[in-house]
Amino acid sequence: MADIESDIPTDPGAPTAYQVRVMQEAGALLGRKETEKNWGDIVELVASPFISARRLATFAPGAENAGKLLWCALFVSYCWWRAWAGFKRFADSECTDLWAKMLAQGWTWEKEDVVGEVETREGNSSDRVRDRSYHMSEAQVFGFARVLPDGGTVEPGPPRMGDIIFFIELDEHGRPLWKDGKPKLRHVGLVRRYVPPAVAP
């Protein structure tokens, strides 16, 4: 697996070669599904680069941690690792920990004033890799991360293809949950496309 040579888009909103490769990797996995709860070939594929074989075996059916390996963050980590080997140091199975690593690099932003819709590709969406869409007004949409292999920080704004989207856990009243000053993130995916709000004629 070779890194993609960095590019500088003429359009600052255009995806980089890395982001294009990420979505190609995600597309190759579209429709792959579990064979048991949180287990199967797709789970082993996205987890094995980051979790030792011995540890991974504890999540197999009948093992002590069977059914407990939530793999949405591993799916995102795998696709980014396939595009850029350097992502391995950021890979994580926990959504909140993945956010923290991205935050430390200056790569994250909360949705705040972003409006419109976003189309995604997600692993561990029910039991498979599938496409979904969300409106930015949905409380569960928390924020985004843009991986910058060549360094730098991100300015808040609309997401673009290949960005990581983070979802926050909600309480019984539909309010976002925080703990110890940190968001309780429950799910992540990859952005396929940002759809801005329609402009009135």
Image (cartoon, grey):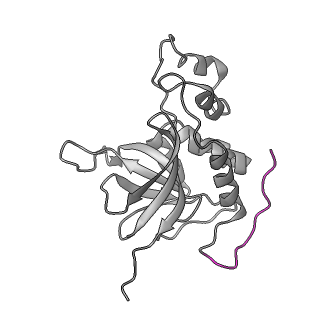
Q: Is residue 106 visible in this depiction of the protein?
A: no
Q: Residue 1: x and y, percent?
A: 80, 44
Towards the viewer: 40 or 93: 40
Residue displayed at 71% across by 46% down: 82
Count of numbered marks: 0
Towards the viewer: 154 or 12: 12
Q: Is residue 61 left or right of residue 88?
A: left
Q: Is residue 18 left or right of residue 2?
A: left
The residue sitting at the bottom extreme is: 201
Magenta residues span 1-12
Q: Residue 47: x and y, percent?
A: 61, 31
Q: Is residue 67 left or right of residue 85?
A: left
Q: Is residue 35 left or right of residue 167?
A: right
Towards the viewer: 133 or 83: 133
The residue sitting at the left extreme is: 173
Residue 6 lies in quadrant:
bottom right
